[in-house]
Amino acid sequence: MTLDKFIKVRYRADEEKVGVLREILSELGIDCARTIEERVDLQFDALKNLHANLGDDELFIKLVMGNSLVSYQLTARGEAWWWEFSKYFSENPPEESISEAYSRFLPNSRTNRRLVAGKVKRLERVEPFLDSLSLGDLRDYYFNGMERLRDELAKALGSKKSAKTIVFAVKMFGYAGRIAFGEFVPYPMAIEIPDDVRINAYTKRFTNEPPVSFWGRIAEETGIPPLHIDSILWPVLGGNDEVLRRLREHCTKWEDVLRLTAL
Ligand SMILES: Nc1nc2[nH]c(O)nc2c(=O)[nH]1
């Protein structure tokens, strides 16, 4: 048990910088987040490629969730990992369970080769839940219940609801649902930002408060749910040239987005 529950912890923040951050994000809004997700983030393209090649909405969405749950301790950038995933399962659609498919995929992966046994175990633990879901259930979670999905995933894995891979799985589920069901549904305000290395390092420029609570507050103040804030920040903080080219090409507010990286 942590002491923070009993003692009111005071965090330091650079209020001037936080004010500029709030102002830029409010100007960008959820529309800009959506443009970045669908036109700039290379992960979204990787998912579109897999969806087109698999031709099976249910399997596609379940694979995307499974992949998110083992997206940690990567040996390359996230974008490269998602493209390796997309190409592999386009060429090798699983004929067995997802965990068995990963026990073949991960040992030969270039971009996700650490802690393979633990990752396969994680997929085995979540498999009964994934297997229990029909395409109708997935549709229902997409249109009416992303928070419920987060809670069920956390329960299946015995994880905290705010654990990085749990909320990240909901983010990628949102991408997959949008591709499979063809409609945009905003992420709920209550789902936390994935606290990964890029987001953690960026948060430290503003405050020593933990990222999840800091971005939860910024989300309320700007009206942009935390997972959409992640979508604005994550690709551009990666500093990939292709991402920056796509940002300039597709996002009319690209200069404001780049101002975020300079804060
Ligand atoms: N916060 C995020 N972490 C990620 N890791 C990964 O592979 N993709 C992401 C992402 O979109 N956001």
Image (cartoon, grey):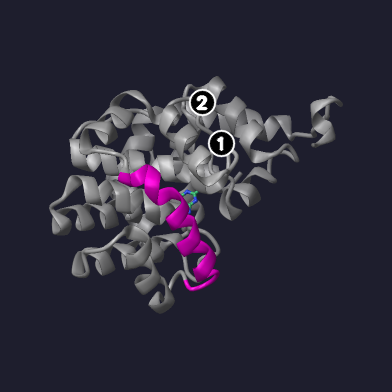
User: Magenta part of the protein: which range?
Assistant: 113-131
Disc 2: which residue: 190
* Any part of residue 204 in sight: yes
Residue at (41% x, 33% y) in the render:
149
Question: Depth check: 99 or 196 in front?
Answer: 99
Question: What kind of residue is marked 1?
Answer: Lys
* Any part of residue 255 in sight: no
Q: Element under label 2?
A: loop
- Image location (x, y in percent) of residue 141: 33, 30
Q: Is residue 91 toward the left or the right of residue 214 in the image?
A: left
- Image location (x, y in percent) of residue 20: 60, 31
Residue at (54% x, 44% y) in the render:
194
Question: Depth check: 235 or 28 in front?
Answer: 235
Residue at (34% x, 38% y) in the render:
174
Residue at (58% x, 33% y) in the render:
21
Q: Which mark is residue 115?
A: none
Disc 1: which residue: 161
- Image location (x, y in percent) of residue 142: 31, 31
**Residue 241: within the magenta?**
no
Q: Is residue 99 above or below residue 69?
A: below
Observer-side mark, 2 or 1, equals 1
Main SS category, magenta section? helix
Question: Depth check: 168 or 224 in front?
Answer: 168
Q: Is residue 261 above or below residue 14?
A: below
Q: Is residue 255 toward the left or the right of residue 137 in the image?
A: right
Quarter that holds the C terminus: top right
Question: Depth check: 92 or 171 in front?
Answer: 92
